[in-house]
Every structure is written in C-alpha cells, then in structure tokens.
Image: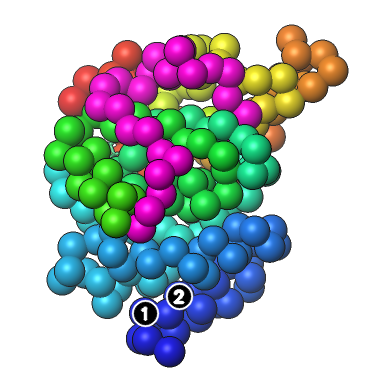
C-alpha cells in the first residue's frame, strides 16, 4: 500500500470515525480521494494532518474533519445536483462529485479555478462544472439544487442561495464575522417548501467570502 493511502486510512480512522462522522458513503469518499494531489508538492506529506493548509492566493484547503462534517450534513444522494461556492483547491468539489450526480462550483479567483479544473479532469470527475465569479448570486440557470455548500464565511446566509434550494434541499454555510463563525445547516421542508429548518453544527473558522453577500477584499 502506498504511503499516502496509509495516511488516508489513518486520517479516516482517527479524525473522522473517532469523532462523529458515521455516513459510510462520506467515509468511503474520504478514504479514496487523494487529498495530497490538491496541495502543493511541498505540502503533500502534511495533506492528511488534522488541520487546514494554505493553497495559492492566500486561501486554504479546509481541515479534513470539516470537509467530512459539511458533506455529511448535506445528505447527498447519487441523483443530487449540488452547488458549491468556493472551489478553492477542488478537494471538497471532488468529494461532492464522488457522491452526487452533478456539481456546479463557483470560485472568484481564476487561477484557483483553473488549477482545480486540471486536477479534477486528471481524476476523471467529469460531472463537475466550474465557473469563475461571485458565488453570492448562485447559479440561477441550473437551480434548483438539492444541496448547497458555502466554503467561505458569510455574515448571513445569502438570500439568492436560499432561493435556489429545492424542496427537501440542504444548505450548509459558515455564518459569522471575519474571525469566527458558526456552521449552520438549513433544510427546506419537502412538504411545506416555505418552511426552513435551521440547525447549529458548531463553531468553525473559514476565510471570508469576498463579494456581494460577504465582505470587500
Ligand atoms: N473547499 C475548498 C477546498 O477544499 O480547497 C476550500 C475553499 S476556501 C476555504 C474558500 C474559497 O472561497 C477560496 O478559494 C476563495 O477564493 C473562495 N471565495 C471567496 N469569496 C468567493 C465568492 N464570492 N465567490 C466564489 N468563491 C469565493
């Protein structure tokens, strides 16, 4: 078994299963997707550590546990259409793409989007569309989505994203100020789509969303 596969299995055992990640599909995705390919070569050895890591343009690849927690909360089925705001390295995108039917991901920094596209193509994730722009507005032409994830912090849940959530759909976003946030899950009721249920998933710390629903650079 190669060294990275060993590190990956250990990560799943000690960081995910040992905490509260129980969804077998999420655990399998995290076991199989080569996270070290989404960071610079010099950081590959650290890719399975229990912390976020820097990527280009002063952004970050999220801690494995946070990726797993958010993905589990999204309750993704293999028929689902998913919207992601903040492609970053493309690692979270790959996890989503391995579980869903289609993933639409928006990244504001063109160089990050291009790098993510390249690695996702290498790994044959052909069910991913990436767009460069401000994710605050969502992806209206492709709405509604069964699941929506924001991987950058927002002061409040963007209204455009809530509007693009299907009946029965789940949205997960870090909401707070630029230093500290709370991870929220919002679920649109299947039978009464006007009803939204909001759940607190705990504290977190994300880079800021820069744009209409977030902050100025
Ligand atoms: N999920 C990513 C991964 O696995 O590497 C990590 C994403 S990183 C924490 C947040 C990303 O959101 C950054 O790449 C940042 O450029 C992007 N971002 C910030 N504001 C944005 C906006 N308005 N629209 C789209 N992307 C945005």
Q: Nearer the viewer, residue 140 or 123?
A: 123
Q: Does 47 appear above or below 183? A: below
Q: Position of residue 202 (x, y in %)?
A: 59, 46
Query: Could you classify mark 1 by the number of other residues whose Cα lies within 10 Å: few (under 14), some (14-19), or many (20 or more)?
Result: some
Q: Is residue 88 left or right of residue 177?
A: left
Q: Nearer the viewer, residue 6 or 175?
A: 6
Please tell me whether mark 1 sits on a helix, a strand or a loop.
helix
Q: Position of residue 163 (x, y in %)?
A: 57, 12
The answer to which image quadrant residue 54 occupies is: bottom left
Q: Is mark 2 within 8 Å of ligand 1?
A: no
Q: Nearer the viewer, residue 62 or 163?
A: 163
Query: Visible in this render: residue 197?
Result: no
The residue at 77%/22% (across/down) is 189
Q: Assign the C terminus to one quadrant of the image.
A: top left
Please tell me whether mark 2 sits on a helix, a strand or a loop.
helix
Q: Is residue 143 magenta?
A: yes
Q: Does 42 appear above or below 124? A: below
The CA span between labels 1 and 2 is: 6 Å
Q: Is residue 101 left or right of residue 2?
A: right
Magenta-highlighted residues: 123-147
The answer to which image quadrant residue 41 occupies is: bottom left
Residue at label 1? 4
Q: Is residue 187 left or right of residue 214?
A: right
* Marks 1,2: beta carbons within 8 A: yes
Query: Could you classify mark 2 by the number of other residues whose Cα lies within 10 Å: few (under 14), some (14-19), or many (20 or more)?
Result: many
Q: Assign the N terminus to one quadrant of the image.
A: bottom left
Residue at label 2? 8
């Amino acid at each position: 078994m190669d060294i990275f596969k060993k590190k990956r299995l250990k990560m799943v055992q000690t960081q995910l299963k040992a905490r509260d990640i129980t969804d077998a599909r999420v655990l399998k995705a995290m076991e199989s997707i080569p996270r070290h390919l989404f960071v610079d070569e010099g950081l590959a050895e650290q890719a399975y550590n229990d912390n976020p890591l820097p990527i280009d343009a002063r952004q970050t690849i999220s801690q494995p546990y946070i990726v797993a927690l958010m993905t589990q909360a999204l309750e993704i089925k293999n028929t689902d259409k998913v919207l992601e705001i903040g492609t970053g390295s493309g690692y979270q995108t790959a996890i989503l793409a391995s579980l869903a039917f289609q993933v639409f991901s928006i990244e504001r920094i063109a160089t990050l989007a291009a790098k993510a596209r390249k690695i996702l193509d290498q790994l044959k994730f052909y069910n991913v569309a990436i767009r460069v722009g401000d994710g605050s507005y969502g992806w209206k032409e492709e709405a509604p989505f069964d699941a929506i994830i924001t991987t950058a912090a927002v002061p409040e849940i963007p209204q455009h994203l809530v509007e693009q959530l299907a009946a029965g759909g789940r949205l997960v976003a870090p909401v707070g100020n630029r230093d500290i946030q709370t991870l929220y899950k919002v679920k649109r009721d299947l039978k009464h789509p006007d009803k939204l249920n909001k759940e607190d998933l705990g504290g977190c710390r994300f880079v800021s969303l820069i744009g209409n629903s977030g902050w100025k650079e």
